[in-house]
Structure formats: structure tokens, C-alpha cells
Amino acid sequence: MYADICQLLNIQYPIIQGAMAWISDSSLVSAVSNGGGLGVLATGHLDGEGCRAEIRRIRELTDKPFAVNIMLLSQFADDIAQVVCEEHVPIVTTGAGSPGKFMPAFKEAGIIVLPVAPSVAIAKRMEKDGADAVIAEGCESGGHVGKITTMCLVPQVVDALHIPVIAAGGIADGRGMAACRMLGASGYQIGTRFLVAKECTVHPNYKARVIKAKDIDTTTTGQSTGHPVRVIRNRLAREFEALEKRAASAEELDALGRGALRRAVKDGDMDYGSVMCGQIAGLVTKEQPAKEILEDLYQDYLRVMSETTK
């Protein structure tokens, strides 16, 4: 199954770098792709021309395959979908909705499509719409999350589909990869571990906070909005939770959260920035080059698999 994913995506390791808005830029994407994984450009904060500029910058930095993630709730989703076709991007991942309306254009452009699915029903719809593989993402992941854990979601999606399934959420080392392999996954999407890649341009305060984080340091805010987000608990998160407990209006919640991710990523505000991070933060202990992260992950996976088959 691994050979299928690596052949499908033309990569060395069956590892996809998760798309993180304001974080997964041309620097990180090209480093991951050059290291043998699949770098993924996040576009949730970009318009069409901003996306085009980043795609062209990636191509200056690598000749390896890479992907563009389209956050389908973005007001610029249509423009970005057009840009990835015009720029002949080889692979697209999608989140926050169904890419169905874009599928004919993607297929005509020869683009491989990997949608993120938080449930079996959505995964089955993605397969029906023509997805080449599905990323089954559990609620342990950072950023916008669903309700089902990776351990429960992945095997059910594997059983329901006829296309490869890529596991995501709560994967930080070879043990997590091996566990998902036993659940039937063909590959892995990993985000938080790449937050501390040397080539990741996130503010140093953000990296330091992720490295310092313990197992219980994340929480999910935004439950009342229908779009929960996993973040490291700080003043912003506690105030957001307090507003939700008293059934604050959508306007109040939006006012508190507006611009919070950028404040964390660009300004290093660890009090009132949205510090998105997966539950595996306690396993992320140091900054490393992206290539070294990929090599360590895969070698650790091989070690674990070897030990389990003795």
C-alpha cells in the first residue's frame, strides 16, 4: 500500500506535511518536498494571485512534487482552484467542504486530488466525487477539527473505501505511523511536527511554545460555531471558552478571534494569538531541518515495525 501512495504522489516517503494557514509557505513546502515528503502550501490566508506567487516561489526552490491545499470555506476558493489548474499544480488537498464542483476542472488538468474527511460519510462522498485518495483526519490534529479520534476514524474509512486512505491527527513519530499502518492507512499527514522545522517561518515564540507544551495543554474552542479549533490553551482560548459558556453572540466571538492566528504566527503573541497545535505537542521536543524530521520519522517507523514482527 505504501508503494501505491509513493508512486501515486511520486515521493520517497509516504508522509504529507499538513497545510497550516500562515505557516505552510514556500519555505516549508519546498524543504519538505526536497526532503522526500509531500510539501503542502496552505492558502486559507491567500487570494488567487498570492497563491500564484507562492506556487512560483516553490518551483524556484524545488523540482519535486508538491501540493496546494484549498480551504473551501475561503472567499477565494474559486480563484485558487483556477490558479492551481493554470499553474499545473500536480496535487491538491482540500478541507472544510467538498471539492465536488471543482473535480471536473481538476481532472481535466491532470491534478491528483486528496480531500480531508472527518467522517466515513464524507469520505465516501469524496470517493464518489473522484478523489484519488482520502485523508482521514482525527480530532487530535491542530487547527480545525472534527469529532472522531484517529484511532476510531481510520479503520472505518479504510473499510468503507476502495481508494487509499491517509491517516492524520495525533501522529508525531514512528509509533504513531506504525499504529496507523495497522489500522490500514497507506500514508500519513503530519502537521505539528513540521511546525518546528528549521525552514518553518513561524515566529520563534510559537516554536518555543509548541516544544514546551505538555499532553494536556491543548483545548478546542469554537464548539458553538460549528467550526471547532484545537489550540494551545492561553488567555485568548480561556476568554473564548468563557464567552461560549455564556452563549455569546457570533459577532462577539468573531471580534475576539479575528486576526488571532496571524498574531500568533507573525507577531509571536502567545497570550492573545491562536496557537494552533495538535495533541501530540508533548512529543515534539526540538527544532530540526525538515529533511531530518522526515528521515527520523521513517527510520523510527521501520524500527517499530521490525520490533513488532520479531
Image (cartoon, grey):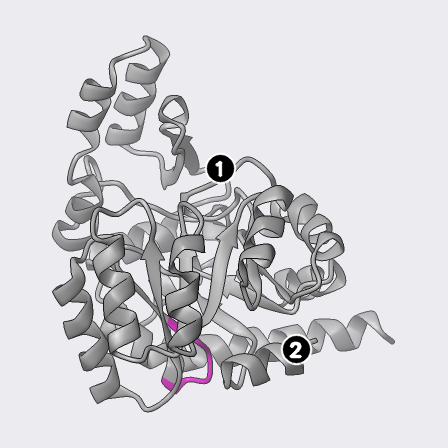
Which portion, as a residue range, is magenta?
A: 34-39
Reply above or below: 98 against 2.
above
Q: Is residue 268 visible?
A: yes
Reply above or below: 53 against 131.
below
Picture quadrant of residue 40: bottom left
User: Toward the viewer: 45 or 259?
Assistant: 45
For mark 1, does the 10 Å Cα neighbourhood hold few (<14), some (14 to 19), or many (20 or more) residues? Answer: few
Type of amino acid under label 1: Ile
Reply above or below: 43 against 199.
above
Quadrant of image for the N terminus: bottom right
Q: Which mark is residue 2?
A: 2
Residue 112 percent coordinates (x, y):
47, 73
Residue 250 on the magenta segment: no
Pointers 1 and 2 in contact (CB under 8 A)?
A: no
- Residue reaching furthest to the bottom: 63
User: Which residue is the site of mark 1?
Assistant: 216
